[in-house]
Amino acid sequence: MLFATIPWKTHFYPMVPLAWALRSAGHDVRVASEPEFLDTITEAGLTAVPVGSGETVEERIRRIRGEDVSGAPAAPFSKNSLYELGKAPRQSLSWEEISWIYNHVVVPQTWLLNDEMVDDLVTYCRSWQPDLVLCDVLTCSGAVAADVVGAAHGRLLFWFDLTLRMRQDFLRAQERQPPGDRADMLRDWFAEWTRKYGRDFGEELITGDFEINVMPERYRLQPHEQTLSQRYVQYNGRSVVPSWLCEAPRSPRVLVTFGLSSRQWEPEMPTVSEKQVQDILDSLADLDIELVLTLSSEERERIHRIPRNTRVVDFVPLDIIVPTCSAVVHHGGTGSFHGPLVHGVPQIVIECSVDAPAKRTVLREAGAGMSIAPDEVTGPRVKECLTRLLEDNAFRVGAERLRQEALAQPTPNALVAELERVTAEHRARR
């Protein structure tokens, strides 16, 4: 079993519990990524396979974009339709809208994150002959390698499946275009690589033979024809329980965290500024709560006033602190969202993540929390939302209901047998 991932912790960490479940069941498990990521993989106790160049992703972005690292321009239209949940028919994006996303976001991101990995991944898979290649949604190079050696190919979903929804929007819009105006840059990227290795393009390269999805079923963005459900299990990397967490909080504990991913190379994503953080702290200073704020030492130096009810830490394992909290305020990252979800803790999402509109819908429909747009983040606004979360027991009831739906899904260990069956099925077809 080969896991393939881009060198971002937020994409690798959710893979670790399943990788260990497979290894504990007796399978040979390895994880392929770029050289800059090898220490992170081996720190998780897993076997790493280096693929790609020695250049880091940050260095590559700077080399390609120069000093302008702002990424793709903002879409000249609303993308809210991409995030609509529910069974009611949705308004698909038009050809102009979806092709703009493909040409300006999806395809440039695909070749930037994958071109350096493809050849090495194919070479390694030809040598090792994995039965299954499991990839996060951005590691398209793993799909190419799986196709070349006839391995089953699964996609790991720890968020909403924008890839599948965008592909279906694209194909529907493409059918309505004149034959000479149906350019498909994502297909072209895959076809160029598969042609190099004597293979033909197939849609399963984009969508996977199957997917593994941790979202409770009724909140999934787009159903795959073959979806395996898995309970989300938190992994945070190296974790130590701080002594202050061994005592029960004297007041309601509130965690405010804007995630490790905000410290990685994602310059195009909105973030919460130090000025906004200071405004939040000032506004929450008179509440009878124990506020735990995660900030790096560099960020902490730019915060001038720390209220008496606030503890500032560089890092604290989410699976250790979240169960002790009455509410969590976060940026919408994978771990920050799923941690409160599986522990039944109400949450406030500052909508910094790309799939924030869908998370907003989940929290609203489940009655498990609230959300705030980045440009609306002020101290008084956060205080207003947090006070409602702490005083209205309905949010706790909604969060517990959502937790039960999440816990009803199979654990990684319980998923192993089904994963073995699906792998054998797709291997036999090839």
Image: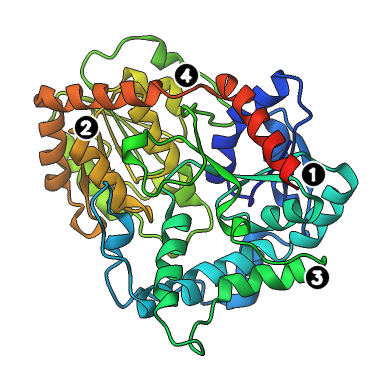
Query: Residue 414: x and y, percent?
Result: 56, 19
Q: Which mark is residue 49?
A: 1
Q: Amino acid at mark 4?
A: Pro
Query: Residue 96: x and y, percent?
Result: 37, 80
Q: Amino acid at mark 3?
A: Lys
Identify the residue at horizontal 71%, vertical 19% (top origin).
25
**Whether label 1 touches label 2, CB < 8 Å:** no
Image check: 187 left or right of 247?
Answer: right
Q: In front here: 289 or 125?
A: 125
Q: Residue furthest front?
A: 429
**Whether label 2 touches label 3, CB < 8 Å:** no
Of pointers 2 and 3, the one earlier in the residue sequence = 3
Of pointers 4 and 2, the one earlier in the residue sequence = 4
Secondary element type, mark 4: loop
Identify the residue at horizontal 40%, vertical 16% (top origin).
245
Query: Residue 125: x and y, percent?
Result: 82, 48
Q: In front here: 421 or 291?
A: 421
**Whether label 4 touches label 1, CB < 8 Å:** no
User: Marks 4/1: CA distance?
Assistant: 33 Å
Identify the residue at horizontal 74%, vertical 59% (top origin).
117
Secondary element type, mark 1: strand
Q: Residue furthest top?
A: 247
Secondary element type, mark 2: loop
Of pointers 4 and 1, the one earlier in the residue sequence = 1
Residue denoted by label 3? 196
User: Marks 2/3: CA distance?
Assistant: 49 Å
